Amino acid sequence: MYSSTKLVACALIVAQLVGSIQCGYYDNTDKWVLSDKTKAFPENAVLGGYDSYGYENFVGRVVYSSSVLPARVRAETGYATYNTESVGNQSTSYELLVSNETVSYDWVRSFDGFLERNAVSVGTSATNERVYVCRGRTDGGIFIGTLYLAQRACFIRYENLPMRQLSKYEVLVRKHTPLTWAPFEAQIN
Ligand SMILES: *[C@@H]1O[C@H](CO)[C@@H](O)[C@H](O)[C@H]1NC(C)=O
Ligand SMILES: *[C@@H]1O[C@H](CO)[C@@H](O)[C@H](O)[C@H]1NC(C)=O
């Protein structure tokens, strides 16, 4: 009896150790293209907003500190910025989300960490939480940010601006378009 209690505690400790060495994993549901400023900008990259200077920002993702995070990428200069719930940073290498004939992307209004249907996940955080792509209007722009459902907020930290934590924001969702014209489905709708 005594030893079996010990055994359970041991298993718990092992589980915690495994948890602490957890790395961020990419989500492979969507198509992401590895890029940097030396590469041609993909035509079908997904627009996410614009920064305080008026530059268009496209949806990207980066790995930072064992976490996969959404990034905002300027097409012109390949300048990519991203943030966790506490720090903001920049990267010269990133992946860009691309659409195709059958899969496109849309922004839907959301709040409080609600899990929207078909929300696009970039991957997981260091604590194995799924990380989603959000955006919000702040500081003279529309900024792509990091959505942690558990924290119920869209986090945006751009350059030297203060961390913004929005409980109302938009979430990036995936839309499937049938490749062939379907008159029967069109009639139902
Ligand atoms: C479009 O991209 C999705 C993944 O995001 C893929 O599953 C699908 O096969 C692609 N469709 C075409 C027509 O390439
Ligand atoms: C920002 O990212 C660079 C690598 O791209 C890294 O060397 C630096 O430590 C990061 N800064 C912070 C505050 O984590």
Image: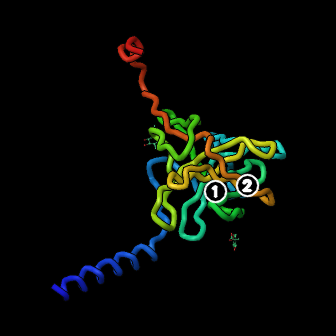
Q: Point out residue 54 in the picture as x, y percentages from the top left corner.
A: 82, 42
Q: Amino acid at mark 1?
A: Ser
Q: At x 62% / y 61%, what residue is drawn? A: 84
- Secondary structure under tag 2 reads loop
Front residue of this view, candidates 2 and 182? 2
Disc 2 Cβ-to-ligand 2 distance below 8 Å: no
Q: Is residue 107 visible?
A: yes
Quadrant into which the C terminus falls = top left
Task: Tell me the distance, in whole angstroms, between the alpha carbons under discs 2 and 1.
Answer: 8 Å
Q: Quadrant of residue 21?
A: bottom left
Residue 51 image offset from top left, x and y in percent: 77, 46
Quadrant where the image shows the N terminus? bottom left
- Residue denoted by label 2: 78
Ligand 2 lies in quarter: bottom right
Q: Are marks 2 and 1 in contact (CB under 8 Å)?
A: yes
Say which amino acid is labelled 2.
Gly
Residue lying furthest front: 2
Residue 35, disc: 1
On the rendered structure, is 154 left or right of 182? right
**Residue 183 percent location from the top left of the image:** 39, 14
- Which residue is at 62% across, 60% downward? 85
Percent position of residue 186, x then y: 42, 15
